Image: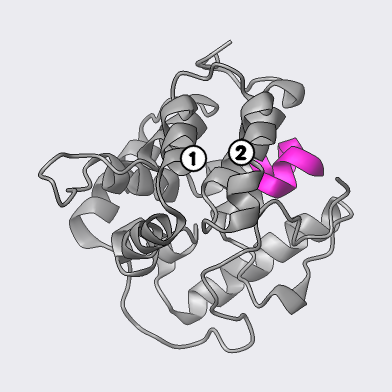
Amino acid sequence: MFPFPRRRPRADAVRPVWAALSVLLDYPTPALVASLDAVEALVPGHPRLAPLIAHLRETELGALQEEYVATFDHTRKCALYLTYFAYGDTRRRGMALVHFKEAYRAAGAEWDESTGELPDHLCAVLQFGATADADAAWRLLEDHRAAVEMLRLALTGWRNDDGTTGSPWAAALLALCDTLPPLEGDEADAVRRLVEQGPPAEEVGLEGYGSSPIIAPATIPVGAPR
C-alpha cells in the first residue's frame, strides 16, 4: 500500500501513517520508546519507517535525545513548526498560527493552551489528522507544503558525525510526502525560494503562543478523541 497514489488518498489510508509519524517525530522519551511496538503495528512492514523504528529501539535513550535536540532544536532548517519556514518569528506568523487554531476548532477540537506548544508543530497537525479530521489536516499540510518539503530536504541532506548523509528522521518526512501529491508549479517555486532565502529573521509578535519544542509523546494536544 506504499507509497500512496498521486491523488488525495482516503482518510482511512493516511490516518495510520500520520498517527505513527506523530509519535516518531516527537522528542524521544521512555514512554515513546515503550510505544514503538504499537506504532509499528499501525504501519507493519512500512519500507520507509521500519529503519527509523529500529533506530529508536536500538539507540540508547540519552544518545537518542541528544541526536534529536541537535537535529530539530539547534538548526533553523530542521524546525518542526510549519509556519516558521514562511514567516520566521514575525507578526505575520502570529496570524498564521491563529489559522491553525481556527482549523482545529472548526473540526470540534480545541487547542490545549496548557501544553505551552505552538499549534503548527508538525506532530500536532499529524495527530489532529489521524484522530479528528484528516481533510482539515490535509489542507493545513498542503497550505504549508513548501515547509514540509524544506524539512524533507534538510533531513535527507543532514551530515552525520561519521561522514554519512541523511538523518534517521528523514524517513518520516519521506513517508509523509508519500501521502501528499507531487509538487507542481508554484509549490515547487516556493520550495526553491525557501532554500535560497530561508525564513524571515525578524523576532517579534509571538507573545502568548509558547515556545517549548516538545510535545508529550502519543498525546493529542488539540483535545481530539483517541
Region rendered in magenta: 126-137
Image position, residue 71 (x, y; %): 33, 58
Residue 89: tell me if it is visible. yes
Task: Name the residue beneath numbered marker 1.
Answer: 57
Separation (CA) of disc 1 from disc 2: 7 Å
Q: Is residue 10 left or right of residue 145?
A: right
Contact, mark 1 vs mark 2 (Cβ under 8 Å): yes
Position of residue 200 measured from the top left corner of the image (x, y, whole percent): 32, 72
For residue 157, above or below residue 71: above
Q: Residue at x 40, y 43 (%)?
A: 169
**For residue 89, above or below residue 107:** below
Q: Which part of the image, by quadrant, shows the N terminus?
A: top right
**Horizontal relation, residue 193 to residue 208: left or right:** left
Q: Quadrant of residue 211?
A: bottom right
Q: Which mark is residue 36?
A: 2
Give the crowd class for mark 2: few <14, some 14-19, many >=20 residues within 10 Å: some
In reply to whether residue 127 is colored magenta, the answer given is yes
The amino acid type found where label 2 is placed reads Leu
Secondary structure beneath label 2: helix
